[in-house]
């Protein structure tokens, strides 16, 4: 037994070492410097909780970025997941269109966010974009709309660059559905359940853990969303489409205020942990079936 424990420790050592030196030390430095006044070219001085106080009491742009991030997390954890799960249930019927739709729906997931941003900039361009041209044809008169820079449409336009593309969710759920024994479907059919009743009351409860995992991936991806916002609106107009990663980037690299940026980073990590714990509780992922 002692020999077995020794080998377990040896195999765990590389992973634990990487976690400690790459992540734990970095997080400790991030937390430590969030309590400091730190700008490039000046001496680092202790600032207590002033950075956190500034963010929550004197910085409406940060509050707006938190609100936008929270809204996008909620949309991603609900509508995005619902689209992916619904499509998985439809494609699992193995119709003639299954292979094509599954491949086409997954394409946005293999394109980089920066390239996707450029793609949507072209589609929604106010002068030559596809959407404005189609609207002009339908209305029979010139239609000009700056989708990304009009305050009325900017939030919706940015949201549409990622919300409907739930190909990853669909693939994950379909993979889990493939492991359900045929006997389960046959038993439901013998009991008189319709296809919809089987999906709602048999299949979906069995998909609880994978849907919970997909929800965590989708929701926490909103805490990393930077490049596509940078490529489309830059957080504007004003701070209409600002999120926390974009605001952190701007605070550190544009405003040269690393102490304040690190305080935002600590809040961002805390929000990620809160999101993770909340979703695990909702889906009861810690409990055995």
Image (cartoon, grey):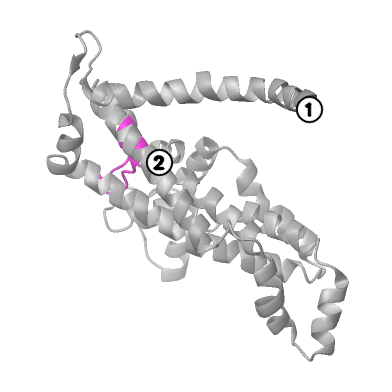
Queried whether the magenta region covers residue 278, the answer comes back as no
Helix, strand, or loop for circle 2?
Answer: helix
Query: Which residue does the image show at 85% across and 88% down from the upper left?
Result: 190
* Residue 207 x/y as whole percent: 67, 64
Query: Which residue does the image show at 31% across and 27% down from the upper left?
Result: 262
User: Who is closer to the viewer here, 197 or 19?
Assistant: 19
Helix, strand, or loop for circle 1?
Answer: helix
* Residue 35 x/y as whole percent: 23, 25
Whether residue 160 sits left or right of residue 64 in the image: it is right
* Residue 148 x/y as whole percent: 35, 49
Relative vertical location of residue 39 with respect to residue 92 in this rendering, above or below: above
Whether residue 18 sits left or right of residue 39 in the image: it is right
Disc 1 crowd, CA 10 A, few/some/many (<14, 14-19, 20+): few
Residue holding disc 1: 4
The quarter in which the N terminus is drawn is: top right
Query: Which residue does the image show at 45% across and 46% down from the upper left?
Result: 222
Queried whether the magenta region covers residue 242, the answer comes back as yes
Read off the magenta span: 232-248
Of label 1 and label 2, which has the lower sequence position?
A: 1
Residue holding disc 2: 229
Q: What number of labels is visible?
A: 2
| Quarter of the rendering containing residue 99 | bottom right
User: Who is closer to the viewer here, 277 or 179?
Assistant: 277
Residue 39 appears anywhere in the view: yes
Whether residue 280 sits left or right of residue 94 in the image: it is left
Identify the residue at the far left of this view: 58
User: Who is closer to the viewer here, 85 or 21?
Assistant: 21
Identify the residue at the far front of this view: 2
Query: Which residue does the image show at 32% across and 47% down from the upper left?
Result: 241
Relative vertical location of residue 204 with respect to residue 159 in this rendering, above or below: below
Whether residue 78 sits left or right of residue 269 in the image: it is right
| Quarter of the rendering containing residue 17 | top right
């Amino acid at each position: 037994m002692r020999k077995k424990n020794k080998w377990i420790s040896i195999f765990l050592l590389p992973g634990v070492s990487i976690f400690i030196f790459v992540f734990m030390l970095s997080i400790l430095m991030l937390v430590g410097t969030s309590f400091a006044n730190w700008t490039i070219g000046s001496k680092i001085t202790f600032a207590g909780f002033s950075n956190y106080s500034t963010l929550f009491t004197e910085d409406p742009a940060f509050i707006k970025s938190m609100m936008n991030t929270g809204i996008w997390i909620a949309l991603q954890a609900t509508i995005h997941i619902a689209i992916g799960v619904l499509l998985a249930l439809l494609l699992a019927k193995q119709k003639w269109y299954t292979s094509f739709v599954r491949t086409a729906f997954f394409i946005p997931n293999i394109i980089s966010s920066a390239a996707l941003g450029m793609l949507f900039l072209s589609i929604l361009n106010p002068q030559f974009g596809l959407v404005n041209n189609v609207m002009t044809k339908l209305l029979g008169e010139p239609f000009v709309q700056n989708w990304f820079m009009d305050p009325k449409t900017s939030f919706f336009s940015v949201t549409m660059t990622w919300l409907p593309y739930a190909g990853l969710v669909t693939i994950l759920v379909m993979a889990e559905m493939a492991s359900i024994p045929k006997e389960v479907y046959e038993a439901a059919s013998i009991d008189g359940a319709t296809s919809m009743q089987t999906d709602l009351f048999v299949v979906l409860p069995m998909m609880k853990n994978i849907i919970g995992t997909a929800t965590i991936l989708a929701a926490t991806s909103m805490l990393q969303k930077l490049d596509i916002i940078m490529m489309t609106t830059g957080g504007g107009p004003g701070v209409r489409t600002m999120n926390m990663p974009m605001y952190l980037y701007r605070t550190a690299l544009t405003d040269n205020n690393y102490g304040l940026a690190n305080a935002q980073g600590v809040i961002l990590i805390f929000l990620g942990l809160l999101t993770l714990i909340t979703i695990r509780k909702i889906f009861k992922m810690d409990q055995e079936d």
